[in-house]
Amino acid sequence: MQISRLSTLLATLSLAGTVHAVANAPATAPDLDLAIAYYSKTVTPDGVTRESRYEETMLRRPGHVWSARVLPAHAAPHKHEEGGHRHGLNHVMLPRHVINAGKTPRLEFVDAKEKAVIAIPVTEFDNVNFDGSWDRAFYLLDPRLLKTMAVTNRASSTPGAKWREREDNGVYQRVLWDEQRQIPVTIESGDKAGTFYRRVDVVARAGATPAPWNKLHGYAQREFADFLD
């Protein structure tokens, strides 16, 4: 939900090369309540190291993915209007709801404070950092890519999870994939030169949170264009 969001972080998983005869993604997967931690580090040519960290929660249910940034207690309330002037949509501060709608998923953000659901057209997906892939939203990566990654002997503390990895031109990708839950436990990518490193850690939370998209009755329906200057 920013440029360092998962869809950007996983871009290196799509290295140049053609994927041949990959299997279809699993038809079903268990419901999950997840806590996800993101970390990235880059070292610039002039020797500056930049690091970023943030966390999200995610609910995965058949046909639905709901994710929300974990915000600090001192975070200022988001505002869409001020002095009669409408500002752009601050989508990072709002829960994101992705709905499986066939070839192209539907995307909306939910503003509980304003009791509004904001629909995002396909043409604006890039502006809210969504790549348009249902599989990557639901599984946190494209499961078919796992078929192109070799299983390794790297130790795993998660029962049933195995490390897969590949490397090309000094850039590596490593995924600890939980076959039972059909979700990555850890995703790592970086280069051998140490100029960048990215990591995602995924933890399944106990319990089952009621589906928040079932509580949107009576919310106003708004369009992304409403927030354009």
Image: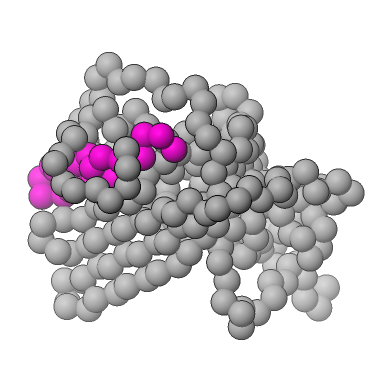
Against 134, is 176 above or below? below
Q: Residue furthest bottom?
A: 74
Using the image as rendered, state which of residue 133 and residue 202 is in the foreground. 202
Dividing the picture into quarters, in which one does residue 179 lie?
A: top left
**Is residue 86 something one can see in this rendering?**
yes
Residue drawn at x 48%, y 64% as measured from the top left: 55
Q: Considering only vertical position in the picture, is 58 above or below 134?
A: below
Q: Quadrant of the C terminus?
A: bottom right
Q: Position of residue 126 (x, y in %)?
A: 51, 48
- Residue furthest right in the image: 218
Relative to 100, say whether 126 is above or below: below
In the image, taking residue 109 as reference, residue 38 lies left or right, namely left
Main secondary structure of the magenta stretch: strand
Position in image of residue 159 (x %, y %)? 32, 42
Image side of residue 185 versus residue 123, left or right: left
Most extreme residue toward the top is 21
Q: Over which residues does the magenta segment extend?
A: 161-181
- Residue sitting nearer the eye, 76 or 180: 180
Q: Which residue is at a point 27% across and 16% down the rendered structure image? A: 21
Above/below status of 132 relative to 148: below
**172 inside magenta stretch:** yes
Question: Would residue 123 be seen by someone viewing this image from the given angle?
Answer: no
- Residue 123, position as x, y percentages in the image: 58, 40
Q: Residue at x 69, y 72 (%)?
A: 78
Count of marks placed on residues: 0
* Picture residue at 21% right of the left edge, 71% below the top: 44
